[in-house]
Image (tube, rainbow, N blue to C red):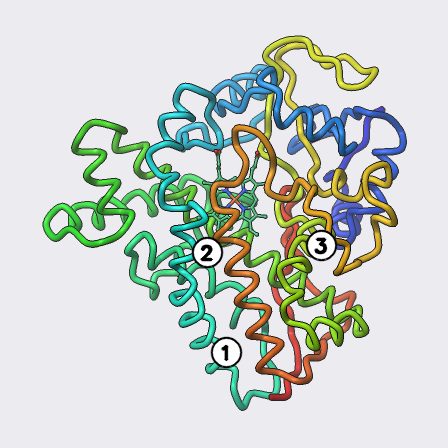
Amino acid sequence: MTTAVDDAAGRMSAFIRDPYPTLARIREAGAVSVVEFGEGLPVYLVTRYQDVRAALMDPRFGQDVRRSQAIASGRGSGLTLGSEVVHMLNSDPPDHTRLRRLIQGVFTRRRVDLMRPMVERISDGLLDGLRGRETADLVADFAFPLPIMVICELLGFPPEDMHAFRTWSTAILTQGGEMTFDQATAEMNDYLRELMTARRAAPGEDVLTDLVRARDADELTEQEVFSMVFLLLIGGHETTVNLLGTATLALLHHPDQLARLRADPAAMPVAIDEFLRYESPVSMATLRFTNADVMVDDVEIPADELVLLSLGAANRDPARFTDPDRLILDRGDPGHLAFGQGLHRCLGSFLGRLESEVALTGLLERFARIELAAAEETLPWRNTIMLRGLESLPVSLDG
Ligand code: HEM
């Protein structure tokens, strides 16, 4: 079956606004579908929970972006997959192992627990900024700055540069916005080069200083430092922003569950898992390719084919989750795939959870009334099939 997910503009926006009915049809039609990705490039799409989970853990699905790019180019596609920015998420072992090992100590549960006061300080500061305002854009004024200020603090970057990161990541991830992919990567590399020089001269207590030291000890190349920072900046904010926006919208749609959560803030960590399942911020895992013939259920995907694993579809699979299209905040099922699984399972999952818990708890504590201040159908969604998130969320507030 061939389904164009992103061909006609009209179809695209309907899909972007609500991808779940289409994903459900694709999931019901068969274990694997062939869809068009980018400029007519055929890609195998896997949507069922068991199959997506198995594929995430199967080394026959590779992620080395240079190989994916070669496959795409070999099919005559002009699609740019960013093969000059090689980081742990788009590489395979042994590079993946080496790169992940260099940084994983920063994101352990214990280290992240120590970040709670910092995250609370940032969240409180942003909520202070909303005090007395009758309306706000919860994405621009809260959901976006929070995780980016956290990751800037970890990396040791000036938080006032965060708007540049947003412009770069929009250009790189969605290949849209005010800048081209090449311009964005070039600008970002220049920016990082300057900061690295500054850290060499005056080391700080931050991740960038650690990376500069590792670079000087020849543990990774300069290009790998850039790519690592790029991945942390993007992984560190695109995802949590999306979750905060969609979780708030979901609460506005479910006033009864919002009231229960207000009455029992201790239920927030369990609710976060349900928000992650219901609107998975990373809707599609990174593009993979088969490095052997692989059977997915009853369908064979030949070697050297590009593959998309839909986390959003898997997390709404009725074969795994009862009533999957319903938000049930006390579902208490952390078995969703929103953080991926296997080798590339999200390195920042503890941090993403902490940020979401602190932010949503703080928001509900501060504002007794939060109402949507725009017509539902006018809400702008991120224009990409890879991520699920709102561009803005206008609300009216009452402290
Ligand atoms: C709600 C928040 C988040 C969600 C839903 C999320 C989701 C994901 C997913 C699905 C993957 C795996 C993608 C794949 O296998 O193709 C991933 C990987 C990754 N995430 Fe997150 N993420 C979140 C927050 C963060 C944060 C805060 C950071 C840290 C700064 C981070 C850093 C990373 C990194 C470095 C990887 C690559 C891991 C590897 O390749 O081994 N993420 N994330």
| Residue 29 versus residue 111 in the image, above or below | above
Query: The disc labelled 3 sits on which kind of residue?
Result: Glu
Residue at label 2? 166
Residue in the foreground of this view, choosing between 167 and 345: 345
Q: CA distance from mark 2 to mark 1?
A: 21 Å
Quadrant into which the C terminus falls: bottom right
Q: In the drawing, does residue 376 fall left or right of residue 70?
A: right
Query: The disc labelled 1 sits on which kind of residue?
Result: Leu
Please give the name of the residue rendered at 38% of the width and 42% of the height, measured from the top-left corner: 185
Q: Within the image, what quadrant is residue 135 found in?
A: bottom right
Residue at label 3? 274
For label 3, the SS is helix
Q: Nearer the viewer, mark 3 or mark 1?
A: 3
Q: In the drawing, does residue 193 fall left or right of residue 186?
A: left
| Residue 138 versus residue 351 in the image, above or below | below
Please give the name of the residue rendered at 87% of the width and 49% of the height, measured from the top-left corner: 323
Q: Tag on residue 127?
A: 1
Q: Say if mark 2 contacts mark 3, CB within 8 Å.
A: no
| Residue 178 versus residue 47 in the image, above or below | below
For label 2, the SS is helix
